[in-house]
Amino acid sequence: MEANHTKYLLYVLVFLGSWLLTCLLHFRQPLFHLSDGGVKVFLPFSHNVSFLSSPTAVVANDWRSPPPPPPLSCDGRYVHIVDLPPEFHVCAEGSPAFTSEHGICHLMSNSGLGPVLLPANGNRSDGDDDDADIIPNTGWYNTNQYALEVIFHHRMRLYDCLTDDPAAAAAVYVPYYAANELQPHTCGLFNATVRDGATGAMLRWLSSRPAWAAHGGRDHFMVASKTSWMFRRSPAAAGDDNTGCGNGFMLRPETRNMTVLTYETVIWEQPPRRRDFAVPYPSYFHPSSAGEVAGWQSRARAAPRPWLFAFAGARRPNGTLAIRDRIFDACDAAAPRRTCGVLDCAAAGGAACRSPRRLMALFASSRFCLQPLGDSFMRRSSVDAVMAGCIPVFFHEASTFEKQYQWHERDPDGGGGRRRRYFVLIDQDDVLQGKAGIEDALSRYTHAEVAAMREEVIKMIPRFLYKDPRVRFAGDMRDAFDIIIDEVIERIRSIKEGEDLGRKEDSDGAVVADGS
């Protein structure tokens, strides 16, 4: 009997040993390893990196939590990232754009987010101490307004449904930084060869690839982080190609087939012919969790707002933008009543306007934020206003979110025909002709109306921000990037199926001020 027990014990030991050896051989490459107190999650694909100081691994938000599960299905959602040759890596270290004192690549640290905003109790020399408690100490960065190309590229590398096979992709992403390449020679004494040379060479290379031939480039998309106008420079008259600004990137036959994401589009171009679509500027808030977003929304909701309206900007020489002169006049007239807050970007070399804390402190203390035209219709300040929970006031229809940021201004939970009021439109011609006063028009709104509009703006914050592109986001929240990807894939699907890409225009989001 004892011999039988010994025999059975040997059988069990042999079985367990075989099982253990099999497991060791099968799992000899670990999926995770601890490093610096966290878990590094290795990406399934390796794509050439053409931007600054990018980690090769994504650090999880919490080492105690497993990585997020993949989406239920990637069917119809795969994206292929083009592997550009080194000569088209615009912001690679050692490249002309990186080393140029006129370039902006050196401002794209932290995967495009820029320098971290120092804690409120840190040792700062920027004079922001009075505003130190306006924004939290985490999730905020001094982000350059032209950084979206870099931020978007990093986010694409975290996208759940990447494929190395362009034929299997619903869309093909081209990680070329057209705006960063243009920046050193945007204006001035640079001829068409200089301004158009690099982008032209990239497009010729791109259109020669087999992946382009499959759909003639109609399944390709990219980000160009300037306004569309900067890429629509028409061929100059003979002998006068040094005038004006920008290049002809959007006028080339290759880009006429692509989907290009810019900060401002030509709203007068009919949607079936349109190939560039406006997406929000990046602001200063780049959270790593849904909890950070909810916390900031609560803070913006509870912030005291002593100013009726606010403006951050500067006059233009010789009154070239007269609406700005009227805004400064309105603020001067409001001084006795202390109803207008202003940051003059022409004062002290514009130091105040380069401080995110001062800017957000002003907007978070104001009920309405004025957004007049600048060099173009859209201003980064409009997105900053949304981040601060400040109701934007536009002075031209082409500046409104419903005309420019149609993908992002829509509230997916807003209900069918419910009228959503979240901004004010005052015709600048009425202001210039004395038919409408800015303070008078804004003071007519009741506290209840202002509170309702502000709540709509605060609800828009997630749709207008870009998450931290270096980490796996903790929580379930769609940001500007998620919306862009969904819309781009849907647009390309419609193109492949030959559908009409026109979209019915609606205008139920604007509050037209009395007298405008």
Image (tube, helix red, strand yellow):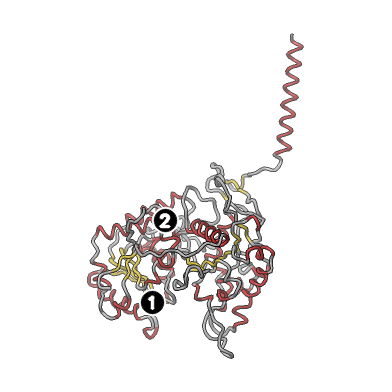
Q: Position of residue 512 (x, y in %)?
A: 30, 68
Q: Amino acid at mark 1?
A: Ala
Q: Nearer the viewer, mark 2 or mark 1?
A: 1
For label 2, the residue is 136
Q: Position of residue 262 (x, y in %)?
A: 50, 68
Which of the two residues, 498 or 163, is positioned nearer the viewer here?
498
Which of the two residues, 395 or 168, is positioned nearer the viewer here?
168
The number of discs equals: 2
For label 1, the residue is 314
Give the left or right position of residue 271, taking residue 397 as reference.
right
Give the left or right position of residue 6, taking residue 423 as reference.
right
Q: Image quadrant for the C terminus? A: bottom left
Q: Position of residue 69 (x, y in %)?
A: 56, 44
Camera sees residue 8: yes
Q: Amino acid at mark 2?
A: Pro
Q: Position of residue 318 (x, y in %)?
A: 38, 86
Residue at the (38%, 76%) spot, across then down: 314
Alpha carbon distance from label 2 to label 1? 28 Å
Kind of element beneath mark 1: loop
Mark 2 closeness class: few <14, some 14–19, many ≥20 residues within 10 Å: some
Residue 127 position by quadrant? bottom left
Residue 300 position by quadrant? bottom left
Give the left or right position of residue 105, taking residue 460 as reference.
right
Camera sees residue 101: no
